């Protein structure tokens, strides 16, 4: 299936540390979609979009979500 819109590369390395990525919409309140990521050790991070096709630094939301693997 061909994407309906253009895409923006999020980088060439580093994202493979996550086994779950999701875009829950605008969680920062600025009107721009953000990301939630969960790594293999079940630590959850949020990334706020900067509005120019990139994301700010990750911020740890929680760790030890072993019972919730793949929820996000």
Image: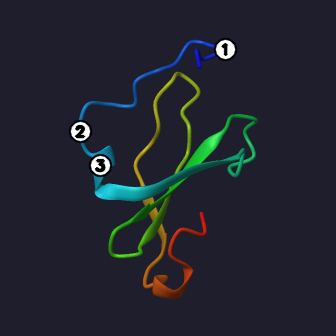
Dot 2 alpha-carbon crowd within 10 angstroms: few under 14, some 14 to 19, many 20 or more: few
- Which residue lies at the image location 56% right of the left edge and 12% below the top edge? 6
Q: Secondary structure at mark 2?
A: loop
**Residue 26 lies in what quarter of the image?**
top right
| Residue 1 on image: x %, y % | 59, 20
- Dot in front, 1 or 2: 1
Q: Provide the residue designation for mark 1.
A: 4
- Dot in front, 1 or 3: 1
- Which residue lies at the image location 33% right of the left edge and 75% below the top edge? 41
Circles 3 and 2 in contact, beta carbons < 8 Å: yes
Dot 1 alpha-carbon crowd within 10 angstroms: few under 14, some 14 to 19, many 20 or more: few
Dot 3 alpha-carbon crowd within 10 angstroms: few under 14, some 14 to 19, many 20 or more: few
| Residue 35 on image: x %, y % | 56, 48
Circles 1 and 2 in contact, beta carbons < 8 Å: no
Indicate left or right for 72 with 9 as reference: right
Going from N to C along the chain, the mark reached first, 1 or 2, is: 1
**Residue 68 lies in what quarter of the image?**
bottom right
Between 4 and 27, which is closer to the camera in this rendering? 4
Between the C-alphas of marks 1 and 3, the distance is 25 Å
Above or below: residue 45 compared with residue 61: above
Indicate left or right for 57 with 23 as reference: left
Between 57 and 5, which is closer to the camera in this rendering? 5
Q: Secondary structure at mark 1?
A: loop
Going from N to C along the chain, the mark reached first, 1 or 3, is: 1
- Which residue lies at the image location 53% right of the left edge and 68% below the top edge? 70
Checking the image for residue 13, the label placed there is 2
Between the C-alphas of marks 1 and 2, the distance is 25 Å
Between the C-alphas of marks 3 and 2, the distance is 7 Å
Q: Provide the residue designation for mark 3.
A: 16
């Amino acid at each position: 299936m061909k994407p309906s819109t253009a895409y923006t590369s999020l980088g060439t390395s580093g994202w493979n540390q996550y086994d779950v990525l999701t875009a829950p919409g605008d969680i920062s309140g600025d009107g721009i979609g953000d990301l939630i990521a969960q790594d293999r050790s079940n630590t959850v991070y949020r990334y706020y979009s900067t509005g120019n096709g990139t994301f700010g630094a990750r911020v740890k939301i929680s760790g030890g979500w072993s019972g919730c693997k793949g929820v996000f």
